[in-house]
Amino acid sequence: MHAFRSHTCAELNKSNVGDTVRLSGWVHRIRDHGGILFIDLRDHYGITQVLCDPDSPVFTEVEKLRAEWCIRIDGTVKARDADLVNDKIPTGEIEVFVRDLEVLGASDELPLMVFGDQEYPEETRLKYRFLDLRREVMQNNMTLRADVVASMRKRMWEQGFREYQTPIITASSPEGARDFLVPSRLHPGKFYALPQAPQQFKQLMMVAGFDKYFQIAPCFRDEDPRADRSPTDFYQLDMEMSFVTQQDVFDTIQPVLRGVFEEFSGGRRVDQNWPQISYKDAALWYGTDKPDLRNPIKMQIVSDHFRGSGFAIFASLLEQDGTEIRAIPAPTGGSRKFCDRMNKFAQQEGLPGMGYIFWREKTADSVAQELGIKVKEAQAKLKSGEVEGGMEAAGPLAKNIGPERTEAIRQQLGLGIGDAAFFLGGKPKAFEAVAGRARTVIGDELGLTDKDRFAFAWIVDFPIFQMDDETGKLDFDHNPFSMPQGGMAALEGDPLDVKGFQYDLACNGYELVSGAIRNHKPEIMFKAFELAGYGEDEVRKRFGGMVNAFQYGAPPHGGCAAGVDRIVMLLADEDNIREVMMFPMNQRAEDLMMNAPSEPQNEQLRELHLRVIPQE
């Protein structure tokens, strides 16, 4: 028999009854039923119930076992009584009577329990990650991650791609985040950098004629942490293709990702139609460039209904250049209680409040006020039909702008009795993000968002340039290496009108993919950087390898990168990316388990010609 096991803890079933077997694993749980000890023995694959009574030659040793001891047992497989069968696990029809025991690794007192659903502080979980990872949910998450990566690889090979590896130690290259720098021992005073992405290398591969590249690539960025972003490193499905248009990239990566989501969705629906939405429309309709299309709410511009109206705040606001009023429709949100709740939300977001209108059945109170009669008279008139019932608009805004404007807003938004609308105004950049968050809260609270679904959208037509409102300086708004739509001719006009062949893929409110058709022509690249205030010499200095390569017959090319960690986070139905990473850092970019970052030894610093200056 094998030194440690004849079977895993998920393999045994009724056909093994009477067999002598050997199992190894961890003591998951111990139960004492009147002198008979029942142990749930766990390994990576599952759980087998083993039991021991005083007739066993190792009963005394079994009594000493504690949770999370690593053990080997030999025993005989027995069938469970019919009323004791556990249908929830594959081994639920059998149990193993222990005849021999070896403790492979005893455990100290546990800082966190593996069995059960107890909640522990994240700091504890990360410091003892090796224990945290033993828990069933974490085992499932890491298995899912491995399976997703394997599926991605298989699907990319089926699309005719080959996987190539790019360097981990390279030159510093500004790509929107801080580099992790690595000092050079052989070249004192100089530094390598860990790559923020394989961006330049994959483009150089296209110049080298490799046509279709992909890689499950590690990327390193010194970023502030968020729930959906690691502060140090992450993995992406990176790909690049030659002689392709933007649509070719979509048609290539879309079936790969759709297939992965369908394979691991756990029964949740995966949208087949992935619309293409312009960056401008996404900002208008959803308040974000990574919209959650499970929420059906679309915001609209309603400025004309407030121009010159009795609502002075919006009317005067609209006299300023670049301002507008947007409405967030809220189907079924037509109650004062809900409107007050959303008003409070706006105040928590730092706004004075959020205007609203809601529509309801006409009340006797409002009729009495309108006609200057008593409520009882109004009730009688409504009942007799002398006064027509129907719908009325309520809320401070409705009173200020009057019934005609209110009705025009209702018709534009397609709302009716029991619905509401919320309003924000000003320069769009100042309130768009809050409007987007309000849309999310409204969709969630009113039950409009379909949680049992993965909804995708390509966001396209990103602007290449932006103007700083305070300095008036032009700079890149997004990826500076994207090909401008219209090429060189587009750069001769107003830079703020120039769109790039750049695109993101959003899913359920997260950005999953970012990519572009690359600017492979040096003269167009120099012109784009010139508009943003960077001379040719500086471009050559920063991106010399790529600029040099593009002078030797560079093909048109493009690609994208999909965030592996974020995809697995969505599939695992987790809210925090650290739940799907094997050994993540904490919120302060610290590895509590390995004690990183740590202070270097003086000898190491001398070798690298470095000196650490103590902080004040």
Image (cartoon, helix red, strand yellow):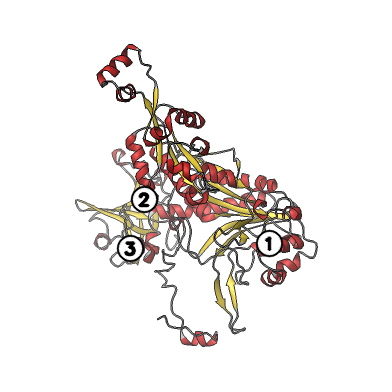
Above/below status of 423 relative to 591:
above
- Element assignment for label 1: helix
**Quarter of the image with the N terminus in it:** bottom left
- Element assignment for label 3: loop
- Residue 69 is tagged as 3
Q: What amino acid type is highlighted by mark number 3?
A: Trp
Query: Which residue lies at the image location 55% right of the left edge and 51% below the top edge?
Result: 512
Instruction: Tell me which label, 1 or 3, sits earlier in the chain.
Output: 3
Q: What amino acid type is highlighted by mark number 1?
A: Leu
Query: Which residue lies at the image location 66% right of the left edge and 65% below the top edge?
Result: 533
Badge 3 vs badge 2, beta-carbon distance below 8 Å: no
Q: Nearer the viewer, mark 1 or mark 3?
A: 1
- Residue 531 is tagged as 1
Q: Position of residue 324 (x, y in %)?
A: 52, 43
Q: Is residue 93 visible?
A: no
Q: Is residue 304 left or right of residue 110?
A: right
Instruction: Tell me which label, 1 or 2, sits earlier in the chain.
Output: 2
